[in-house]
Structure formats: C-alpha cells, structure tokens
Image (cartoon, rainbow, N blue to C red):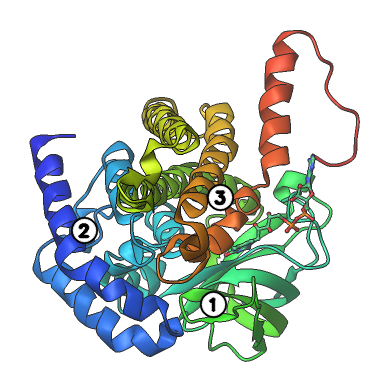
Amino acid sequence: MTPTGAAYLKEVRSFLDSHVFPAEPGVMAKPFKESLPLLAELRAEVKKRGLWAPHLPESLGGRGMTLGEFAHVSALLGESPIGHYLFNCQAPDIGNSELLHDHGTAEQKATWLEPLARGDIRSCFSMTEPEFAGSNPVWMGTTAVRDGDDYVINGHKWFISSAEGSAFTIVMAVTDPNAAPHKRASQIIVPMTAPGITLVRNISTFGHAGSDWMSHAELRYENVRVPVTNILGHEGDGFMLAQERLGPGRIHHCMRWLGICERAFRLMCQRAVSRELSPGEPLGNQQAVQFWIAESRAEMDAARLLVLDTAAQIESRGAHEARERISLIKFHVAGVLQRVLDRAIQVHGALGVTDDTPLAGWYAHERAARIYDGPDEVHKASVARRILKEYGLPSRKRGKE
Ligand SMILES: Cc1cc2nc3c(=O)[nH]c(=O)nc-3n(C[C@H](O)[C@H](O)[C@H](O)COP(=O)(O)OP(=O)(O)OC[C@H]3O[C@@H](n4cnc5c(N)ncnc54)[C@H](O)[C@@H]3O)c2cc1C
C-alpha cells in the first residue's frame, strides 16, 4: 500500500470500531429493509469522512484505488457483514459499476452509473436460470428479440442477489441463438420498473428469505421492452463481459472472505483465552484448539498472499491471462473460509451456533461461496485441465464448454 492507502485503511479501521461493529448486531437481528434509515445515516458519515467508494475513480466521487489497493480495503470491510454496503462497494453493484464504467455509453453512464456511484440507487445482475445449469454460462433460455428500436425480453431468472429495491438490472439474454455458443448472449440494462418484470419471491435460504440488499430473488421477464440502446457493448458480447466482470469480482469476494476469516479468527482466539474448562484452565490450553488456531493463521496468510499476487497478475497481464490463478483462488479461499468459520464455531461451543456472534450467520450465508461465481468443481476442473494440457491431455470433444 502507498502511504495514502495505508492512512485510508487506518481511517476505515477506526470507523469500523466506532460506528460499524456497534451498529452491526441491531442490523443483523432484523430484516435488512428495516435498518435502511440507520444505514443511510452511516453511509452519509462514510461520505463525510471522504472514505466513500474506494474502488471508483475520483471523477465519480470515489478514491480511485487500484485493484491491488482495493483488495486490502475489501479484506477490512469484510470483517463486518455490512462493511461493503456502507462504503458503497458491495456486490453486485461493484461489478455493475465496473461494467458500466468500462463499457457504458455516455448516456448509460449518466442514467445509471452516476446515481449508482452516489449511492442513490442499487442494481442487480440477472444471469442464472432455474431451468439451466448455471455452471454452464453459455446455456440459457432467456431471449432478447429485436423489434424495431426495442429488445423484447422473455425469461426466468433466479438467485438474483439484491433485486428487491434495485433500480435496474443487467440481464444476460440470448440475442442470436444461431451464433457460436460464446457469442449468443448479450447484456442489456433493464429498469426494474419496466412493465413485464415480476419479482416472484425472495428465495428463502437456510430459513431466511432476507430483504432488500440482503436477498436473492426469483424474477420473471414477460415481454419486457427496452430500447436497443440499453445494450452493454455489442450484441454477442454477453459472455465476454460476464468473464470480464468475474475477474476482479473474484478478488473482491476472496478478500471479503479473508476479512470474515480475520474476524472469526479474532473471536476464536478471544474465546480460547476467556473460556475456562475448569478454574484457571482456559480452552486455549487444549492442543486441539491450538492446532485450529495455528492452521487457520497459516491458511489465511497463505491465501491472502495468493489473492494479492493474483490481483497483481490481473493488473499486469489482464484477467484473461490470469484466469487460471483466478480459478485457483476462488475455490481455495472459499475452502479456507469454510474451515476457519467451522473451527471458530467449534471453539465457541453452543454460543457458536447462536446469533449472538456473527459466526453462525456467516456459516450459513457464506456456504454459498463454494457455489456462486462458479462452483468449486468447475474451477478445480478448469485449473487441472490447463495444467494437464501442458502434459499433453487432448481437448475434450463435447458440444458445450
Ligand atoms: C447466494 C447466491 C447468490 C447468487 N447471486 C447471483 C446473482 O446475483 N446473479 C446471478 O445471475 N446468479 C447468482 N447466483 C447463482 C450462481 O451463479 C449459480 O448458483 C452458480 O453459477 C451455479 O449454478 P447452479 O446453481 O445452476 O448449479 P449447477 O450448474 O446445477 O451445478 C450444481 C453442482 O454441480 C456440480 N458441477 C457443476 N458443473 C460441474 C463440472 N463441470 N464438473 C464437476 N461438477 C460440476 C457442482 O458441484 C455444482 O455445485 C447466486 C447463487 C447463490 C447461491
């Protein structure tokens, strides 16, 4: 980090301690929607302190950090479930703002990116469909058919994070079913108020349907009409843009997960020294607990270096060239996250499964880390295939990638 970056991190740490951690239990104890007024006040304070949107360029009111610098911030903010939201660098808005910044027209930027950057609106990303395997990103049923100066969109999407309360979504839809698989789909900006969009439900996961930013919706698109000027990039660019979005996105997720690990680790250590098994005999004297602490520290530190190195590779070689490393960190860090959370819960005993600490909520919510943005198995297979190719493994003969 540059000295400016390091000073920024110090200010973020101080804000987390003074404002975020104290507010967190109240926010997490009720539906997210009910805390929106309090969250708006906290966001205003972040802005007032000049800490807003570290990833965005200064021209959009952000701090203009590089991916490598933002990675450190993401780890810090990850220590609270509301950290990224308060600093306006939460998924899926962060990915959408990067797409709009790099590929949006001047009109798209003025209409969608600028209010997004100010935090006046939120957005979501509609790609996955219940009827098709999300692991195969070139296979989908949603279509966008040209009709004069409009696209008419029909389809069914689910697990659309943060759809409730979003002002717009970016939809992946097939625009040319006869093109090569990777050229069939396009990304189209659709206002959530467009006639024909139905938010069927917020999907209940591990017993909670969530609300607003903390929710995942099922959406139906029935003859939704938007101007052709709402396309991002060109027709057929959808898959390429999705890949581009996911490169930095995986750095953001991995560092956020490592932030969760840091907080879980802290809680684990605090519990290990404060909980006595008998008078004068703290839990931390048990070798099993010591092993969990040592293993967690080693796994977290190694993972952090791997992610930061991958961020540097994306910056120097581009996301496409660094794709093997991006796959590697995605499944590796998701595994570290799951193990560290599990150990921290075990050290807390019954307290670990209550909602009196953030551990149980994370354990449930972040189980999905091994599924979204590509399940573990897809990433492992893709890393191994590229390695084995160097040893002469022939390409697979199949219809779809
Ligand atoms: C919490 C959460 C948030 C999400 N947010 C969004 C969002 O905002 N927008 C959006 O569009 N989507 C979102 N998704 C969807 C996510 O991208 C998909 O769930 C993911 O791509 C996997 O697709 P699928 O669920 O259809 O699983 P499937 O493709 O049906 O795969 C099921 C399982 O099969 C196995 N598998 C799949 N392919 C292979 C393979 N090649 N080799 C070996 N095993 C394999 C894996 O174990 C995988 O978990 C979200 C999902 C979750 C859980």
- Find residue 13 and name its label: none
Q: Which numbered disc flags the more N-terminal residue, 2 or 1?
A: 2
Could you tell me residue 366's position as x and y percent? 54, 57
Taking the view exactly as shown, the residue that stands out farthest to the top is 391
**Mark closer to the observer (3, 2):** 2
Q: Which numbered disc flags the more N-terminal residue, 3 or 2?
A: 2
Task: Report if the beta carbon of the residue with label 2 is closer than 8 angstroms to ligand 1.
Answer: no
Q: Is residue 375 above or below residue 296?
A: below
Question: Left or right of 294: which side holds 155?
Answer: right
Determine which residue is flagged by label 3: 241
**Under tag 2, what secondary structure?**
loop
CA–CA distance in space, label 3 to label 2: 23 Å
Determine which residue is flagged by label 1: 163
Task: Report if the beta carbon of the residue with label 1 is closer than 8 angstroms to ligand 1.
Answer: yes
Q: 294 or 91: nearer the eye?
A: 294
CA–CA distance in space, label 2 to label 1: 24 Å
